Image (cartoon, grey):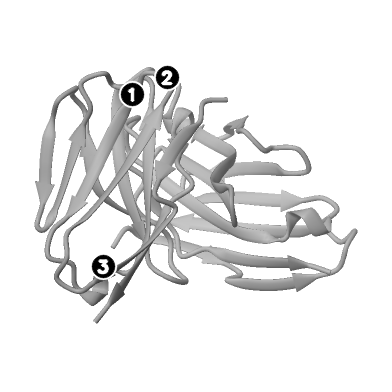
Amino acid sequence: DAGITQSPRHKVTETGTPVTLRCHQTENHRYMYWYRQDPGHGLRLIHYSYGVKDTDKGEVSDGYSVSRSKTEDFLLTLESATSSQTSVYFCAISGQDTGELFFGEGSRLTVL
Amino acid sequence: GQQLNQSPQSMFIQEGEDVSMNCTSSSIFNTWLWYKQDPGEGPVLLIALYKAGELTSNGRLTAQFGITRKDSFLNISASIPSDVGIYFCAGQPDRYSGAGSYQLTFGKGTKLSVIP
């Protein structure tokens, strides 16, 4: 199994509070991604990183920010959580630019 | 953005039966991938296809990269209970484009149920 750890795995929070999800990898892969998965929408890319301090927006980036200060860590922040951000969030990594992603186990976020 | 049409959305089959599912796109892709997601877990890569017309197998799974580059197919032979899960196709327009796999587009999944 690819060495990817997401934390927390489950979180319940209230509207308006900040939330940070962490993705940690031990594979030294260059590329890291944050996806959200919702019924009827499949997997949608939020943000991605192609190196330390190199990040860019994905398809559904509004309301989210990311940071990557080290190769192994990619943080996803919701500055002020909303109910529409209730979802399962997946981190993924890849060593090359081929679409072959390794996914973490997911973080289930509920915003009340 | 680009969209993939994956069908069927769900299927119920008897153990031992063969399964077929497919993805179609209005755009050309140069890479097609198939992932499987078990309940409560992240997707896992099953098969990657890089050439139009390519046919690749992984055990009981066989996937094909359509000649038009706008579709791909996944077949599972002699299904077993552990085949249960959601199968996703994904397409990438450019390989080694330097832009990263952010261009990957996922289908909405085919939920497979196997009746023992």
Where in the figure is residue A36, as x and y percent of width and height?
59, 51
A63 horizontally vs B49: left or right: right
Cα distance in 3D space between marks 3 and 1: 26 Å
B78 horizontally vs B89: left or right: left
Where in the figure is residue B82, as x and y percent of width and height?
25, 73
Cα distance in 3D space between marks 2 and 1: 6 Å
Q: How many numbered marks does the figure carry?
A: 3
Q: Are marks 2 and 3 in contact (CB under 8 Å)?
A: no
Question: Share a chain, discs 2 and 3?
Answer: yes
**Residue under circle 1?**
B70
User: In terms of sequence position, does the residue under pointer 2 or pointer 1 come before the other?
Assistant: 2
- Considering depth in this image, is A71 or A40 the residue closer to the camera? A40
Tag 3, which secondary structure?
Answer: helix
User: Which chain's residue wears label 3?
Assistant: B
**Residue under circle 3?**
B83
Tag 1, which secondary structure?
Answer: loop
Q: Quadrant of the C terminus of chain A?
A: bottom right
Tag 2, which secondary structure?
Answer: loop
A47 horizontally vs A92: left or right: right
